[in-house]
């Protein structure tokens, strides 16, 4: 016996398994998303160094990420910033934070923050050295020079 | 009584409209798929960079001093490595102290030569060196410098510790002209 068109229009597919699957996919993407990547300027071409190891601070260390392009310009979250004032501000904030924690920085002591330098592979040393010296002037001593393990893209 | 029975039946018949929830879930999924961009894994070289000040070893005995001076240390715990660059910012020459480690590009073979020179300076018993100061030509590319730093960070001091005290000094124009 054939079904009437009225019966066809009242068909109700079970959406529950579909919804389950979609929620699982959403959960996956929520877990793998990393908002810290926004601080990294992906347009920079980092140098390639086979012995470079991934950074693992186990959440114990504060990082100050400096994206430096081939002309020595500093970019923070994609916005160009003046190097001297930005590093001075960050150092001041870090000192204030340590003071609030009850461990103020004594004269000559180094800041616990690690400066992560992500410079373009063609950046001349002179420009890079000026930035490193500025950091040292503000008591930063720990540095991490970023590089890729292998060449990506063309 | 009859009313309660009708009410309970009505409650059991409740059906959620999943279509709208599914719409929302798909919108969320579309957002995550479109914004998902896995970034490549980046490595790093960790360094402790104090300002470039040579540390004088006042307790070094005369014999050690001679060896140190011979290797380019000159009565100090500091070993100088000079990196010269050509006009395009690539490595032209690398010196360990006053000795030339290699001439030409920083390829695998030349970097191995540099590694050997540094090993000779650090490996002998009683080696006074505790830090390396790298004198770098101002126009040297960051990538080229990283290759030299990589070799330096592989060295071990006389007490078997990995070398982590490395400083940079910018070479003057006259030094570069040599």
Image: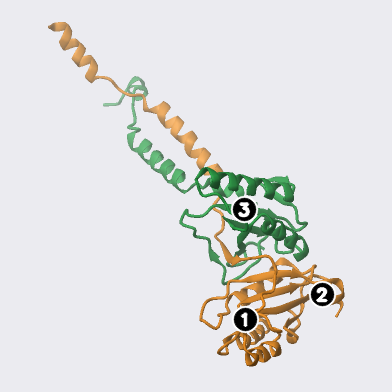
Of badges 3 and 2, nearer the viewer stands 3
Discs 1, 3 touching: Cβ within 8 Å:
no
Front-most of residues B177 and A79: B177
Q: Is residue B150 visible?
A: yes
Q: Circle 1: is it few (<14), some (14-19), or many (20+) Cα within 10 Å?
A: many
Q: Residue at x 65, y 53 (%)?
A: A66
Question: Residue under mark 3: which chain is it in?
Answer: A
Residues tagged by mark 2 and mark 1 found on one chain of the structure: yes
Question: Could you tell which of marks 2 and 1 lies nearer the N-terminus?
Answer: 2
Which quadrant of the figure contains the C terminus of chain A? bottom right
Question: Which x, y percent locates residue B149?
Answer: 65, 73
Q: Is residue B45 left or right of residue A120?
A: left
| Viewer-nearest residue: A105 or A74 | A105
Residue B168 in percent (x, y) is at 70, 69
Label 2 with label 1: CB-CB less than 8 Å: no
Look at the numbered disc 1 and give the secondary structure of its residue. Answer: loop
The reply to the same-chain question for discs 3 and 2 is: no
On residue A65, the disc is: 3
Image colour for chain A is: green
As drawn, the chain in orange is B
When the figure is inspected, residue B74 is found, relative to residue A43, above or below; the finding is below
Q: Residue at x 30, y 22 (%)?
A: B15
- Distance Cα–Cα, label 3 vs label 2: 30 Å
Regarding mark 2 in the picture, which secondary structure is present there? loop
Report in which chain the residue with disc 2 lies: B
Q: CA distance from mark 2 to mark 1?
A: 29 Å
Q: Looking at the rendered structure, which numbered label has been put on residue B86? A: 2
Q: Position of residue A121 (x, y in %)?
A: 70, 64
Residue under circle 1?
B129
């Amino acid at each position: 016996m054939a079904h009437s068109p009225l019966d066809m229009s009242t068909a109700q597919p079970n959406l529950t398994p579909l919804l389950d699957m979609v929620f699982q996919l959403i959960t996956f993407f929520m877990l793998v998303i990393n908002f810290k990547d926004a601080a990294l300027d992906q347009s920079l071409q980092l140098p390639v160094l086979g012995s470079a190891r991934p950074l693992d601070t186990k959440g114990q260390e504060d990082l100050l990420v400096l994206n430096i392009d081939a002309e020595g310009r500093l970019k923070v979250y994609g916005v160009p910033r003046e190097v001297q004032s930005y590093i001075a501000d960050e150092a001041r904030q870090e000192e204030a934070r340590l003071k609030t924690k009850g461990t103020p920085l004594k004269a000559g002591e180094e800041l616990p923050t690690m400066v992560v330098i992500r410079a373009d592979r063609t950046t001349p040393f002179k420009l890079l050295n000026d930035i490193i010296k500025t950091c040292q002037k503000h008591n930063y001593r720990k540095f991490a020079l970023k590089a890729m393990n292998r060449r990506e893209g063309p | 009584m009859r009313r309660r029975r009708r009410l309970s039946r009505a409650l059991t018949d409740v059906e959620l409209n999943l279509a709208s929830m599914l719409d929302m879930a798909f919108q969320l999924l579309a957002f995550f798929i479109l914004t998902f961009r896995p970034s490549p894994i980046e490595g790093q070289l960790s360094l402790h960079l104090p300002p470039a000040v040579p540390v004088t070893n006042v307790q070094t005995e005369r014999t050690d001093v001679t060896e140190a001076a011979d290797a380019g240390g000159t009565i100090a715990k500091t070993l100088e490595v000079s990196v010269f660059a050509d006009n395009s910012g690539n490595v032209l020459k690398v010196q360990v102290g006053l000795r030339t480690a290699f001439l030409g590009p920083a390829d695998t073979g030349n970097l191995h030569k540099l590694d050997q020179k540094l090993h000779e300076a650090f490996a002998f018993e009683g080696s006074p060196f505790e830090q390396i100061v790298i004198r770098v030509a101002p126009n040297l590319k960051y990538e080229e410098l990283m290759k030299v730093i990589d070799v330096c960070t592989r060295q071990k001091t006389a007490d078997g510790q990995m070398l982590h005290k490395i400083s940079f000094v910018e070479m003057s124009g006259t030094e570069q002209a040599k």
